Image (cartoon, grey):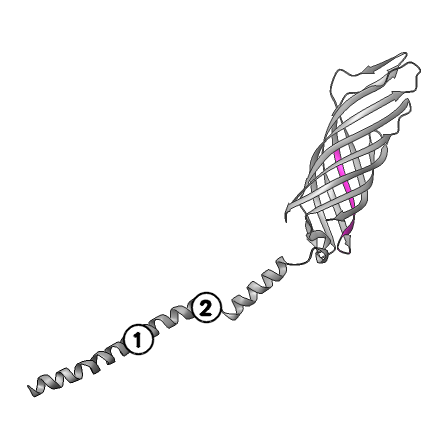
Amino acid sequence: MTRSLSDARLAPARTSIGCALLVVAAHLLATPTARADAPTEVDADVDVAEEVSERTPFRERAAFDRDFALAIYGTGWVGRYAAGGGGARARWEPFDRLGVEVYTEHLKVIEDEGLRHDHPIGFNLYVPFQFGERFRLRPLFGFCTVFSFFHPDQEGVERIDDVHFGVHAGLGAEVSFGRFVSLFVDVQGVAYFGHDRYAGGWATHVGDNLSVWGLVQGAAGIQVHL
């Protein structure tokens, strides 16, 4: 009887001790997991740096870090014939190593037999390679269409029009000034496909066969980065 009473009195104490041990064990098991899940100081610093980079104000970005640009420039051709004029282009760089630009140009061609003016429209694909913050090179490649108009000097002779198609490749160099402006120079070789035209007597003549000729084109201008 005495032993039974002692066991009955000790039962609550044993239960309390068991509960305390379970609580301690659970705490020890949970603590490493909580520490592993908690971010370290290094991770926190990296996250803050990335957030700061993403939040760089628009006005503080470097010119070549901007995705869009507009440009005006002077341009000229030499080769089978010579010409000079101007152009404008719009640029978009969706990736760090790929850009695309569309352009329109207007040139007066040196022609002894009358007035000729050509109007190319086309596009370039280019790969920019940056050297420092302010200078970069960009190999380029593209296609164009030229609407060519020739007004012979002879009285009563009608205008001769033709459409030329071209493929070109070259190299451009760019230097930035400030955060919004850059200057550029491009040099490229162009292969054109079209028809020969000339005025003879009282009539104009357009060749029946497709001709191919080459030109070298240079361009220099100013660009605004957006």
Label 2 element class: loop
Residue, disc 1: 23
Q: Quadrant of residue 16?
A: bottom left
In the rendering, at what x and y percent does residue 15 appear? Answer: 21, 78
Verify whether residue 184 appears in magenta. Answer: yes
Label 1 vs label 2: CA separation? Answer: 22 Å
The residues colored magenta run 178-190
Q: Which quadrant of the figure contains the N terminus?
A: bottom left
Q: Amino acid at mark 1?
A: Val
Element marked by disc 1: helix
Residue in the foreground of this view, choosing between 79 and 8: 8
Q: Is residue 15 above or below residue 94?
A: below
Q: Is 179 on the left or on the right of 50, as rendered?
A: right
Tell me which residue sits at (75%, 40%) in the image.
89
| Residue 29 image position (x, y, % from top left) | 33, 71
- Of marks 1 and 2, which one's residue comes earlier in the chain? 1
Magenta stretch, overall SS = strand
Q: Which label number is shown at residue 125?
A: none
Q: Which mark is residue 38?
A: 2
